[in-house]
């Protein structure tokens, strides 16, 4: 299993602008200054401004926290690896592009909770996957050259959804599914003339976690070294309108016993019973605020430095920054940057 950090920044992170020059522009700049007989005596500020005149203003974005998990098994697309997104960022198009991927390369999505920086990319994923006739061999065969809206509208046996093997997977806790439907429903109800369009038109839904019946559902992903069992992990995120809003992170446990914990958005050890999961895990992907004014809905870097036990600290890969965290050397397992990846077990 391979985990890649697509984004590592906080919900409202944007990015910075900088001046950049191409190799050809460097040649122009050198030629420009070589023609000035007084080059060696030119003021530094003047040289800087002249270089800016040749440069382009470039945007260096910061993407919200989401991850790509890859399993060495055949996915919905009929290809290996199976690619699972852990949350969809505020707009996942850009962070996927940064690692050379698009929605056509994704087999499934897990959604931890219905905040925009975790579900904002759902509309892009839904629509581009649905209207891609070559998303998977089974979808191409099912369509038979027809436009999907015509297929759904004219062959009403398919209302309101295509066959499950032609849709990407959506793994989700039942308590997250309903608010997700409310949040993204209007944007997905865009197929002219097709009635009863909902999120299941776009995704093959897999409920995981504890059900009304008391049964706890998990999901197994096969890998080259065995299998990984995924189950949701309740963590308190925020009290909203006097009611709790949980964030259901995931525990990924390999058939060998190796455990990777990805709590997503949580408060530090809230509820306290989370500590047992942290102790059991071998690696933890830990969100971490670094702002001067803690929000109270995420663990702050000061909490993690001063309240977390050293044994747990050494398991944690930190992400979710307002500014890059400054921590003592060797206190944590690492500090993630976008594009960083790790292979387990």
Image (spheres, rainbow, N blue to C red):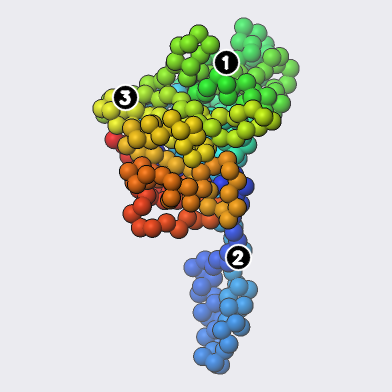
Q: Which residue occupies 63% across, 36% down? A: 116
Above or below, comparing residue 125 to residue 15 in the picture:
above
The image shows residue 69 at horizontal and vertical percentages of 42, 34
Report the side of 116 relative to 39 (left or right).
Answer: right
Report the side of 153 relative to 236 (left or right).
Answer: right
Q: Upstream in the sequence, badge 3 or badge 1?
A: 1
The image shows residue 41 at horizontal and vertical percentages of 54, 92
Closer mark to the observer between disc 2 and disc 3: 3
Tell me the element at label 3. Answer: strand
Check disc 3 and report the residue beneath it.
227
Quick check: can you spot residue 13? yes
Check disc 1 and report the residue beneath it.
162
Report the side of 336 relative to 143 (left or right).
Answer: left
Disc 1 packing (10 Å; few <14; some 14–19; many ≥20): many
Check disc 2 and report the residue beneath it.
56
Disc 2 packing (10 Å; few <14; some 14–19; many ≥20): some
Above or below, comparing residue 180 to residue 211 in the picture:
below
Q: Are marks 3 and 1 in contact (CB under 8 Å)?
A: no
Q: Upstream in the sequence, badge 2 or badge 1?
A: 2
The image shows residue 136 at horizontal and vertical percentages of 48, 24
Q: Which residue occupies 29% across, 35% down? A: 345
Q: Which residue occupies 44% across, 16% down? A: 217
Label 2 and label 1: CA atoms lie apart by 46 Å
Tell me the element at label 1. Answer: loop
Residue lying at the far top in this picture: please name it. Answer: 157
Q: Is residue 272 or residue 117 the one in the foreground? A: 272
Q: Quadrant of the N terminus?
A: top left
Report the side of 5 relative to 17 (left or right).
Answer: left
Disc 3 packing (10 Å; few <14; some 14–19; many ≥20): some
The image shows residue 68 at horizontal and vertical percentages of 45, 37
Q: Is residue 55 or residue 198 the one in the foreground? A: 198
Q: Which mark is residue 218?
A: none
């Amino acid at each position: 299993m391979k985990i890649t950090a697509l984004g590592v920044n906080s919900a409202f992170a944007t990015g910075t602008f900088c001046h950049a020059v191409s190799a050809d522009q460097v040649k122009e700049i050198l030629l420009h200054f070589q023609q000035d007989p007084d080059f060696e005596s030119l003021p530094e500020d003047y040289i800087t401004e002249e270089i800016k005149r040749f440069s382009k203003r470039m945007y260096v974005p910061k993407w919200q926290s989401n991850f790509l998990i890859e399993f060495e098994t055949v996915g919905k697309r009929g290809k290996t690896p199976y690619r699972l997104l852990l949350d969809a960022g505020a707009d996942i198009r850009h962070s996927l592009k940064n690692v050379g991927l698009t929605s056509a390369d994704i087999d499934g999505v897990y959604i931890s909770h219905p905040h925009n920086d975790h579900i904002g990319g759902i509309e892009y994923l839904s629509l581009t996957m649905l209207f891609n006739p070559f998303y998977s061999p089974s979808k191409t065969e099912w369509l038979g050259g027809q436009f999907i809206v015509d297929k759904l509208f004219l062959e009403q046996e398919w209302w309101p959804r295509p066959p499950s093997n032609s849709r990407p997977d959506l793994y989700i806790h039942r308590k997250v599914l309903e608010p997700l439907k409310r949040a993204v429903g209007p944007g997905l109800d865009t197929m002219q003339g097709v009635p009863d369009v909902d999120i299941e038109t776009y995704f093959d839904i897999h409920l995981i976690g504890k059900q009304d019946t008391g049964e706890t559902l998990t999901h197994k992903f096969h890998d080259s070294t065995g299998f990984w069992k995924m189950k949701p992990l309740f963590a308190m995120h925020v009290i909203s309108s006097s009611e709790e809003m949980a964030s259901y992170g995931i525990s990924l446990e390999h058939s060998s016993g190796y455990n990777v914990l990805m709590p997503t958005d949580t408060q530090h050890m809230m509820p306290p019973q989370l500590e047992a999961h942290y102790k059991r895990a071998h690696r933890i992907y830990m969100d971490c605020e670094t702002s001067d004014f803690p929000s109270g809905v995420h663990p702050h870097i000061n909490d993690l430095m001063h309240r977390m036990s050293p044994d747990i600290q050494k398991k944690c890969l930190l992400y979710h920054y307002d500014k890059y965290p400054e921590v003592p050397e060797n206190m944590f397992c690492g500090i993630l940057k976008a594009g960083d990846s790790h292979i387990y077990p």
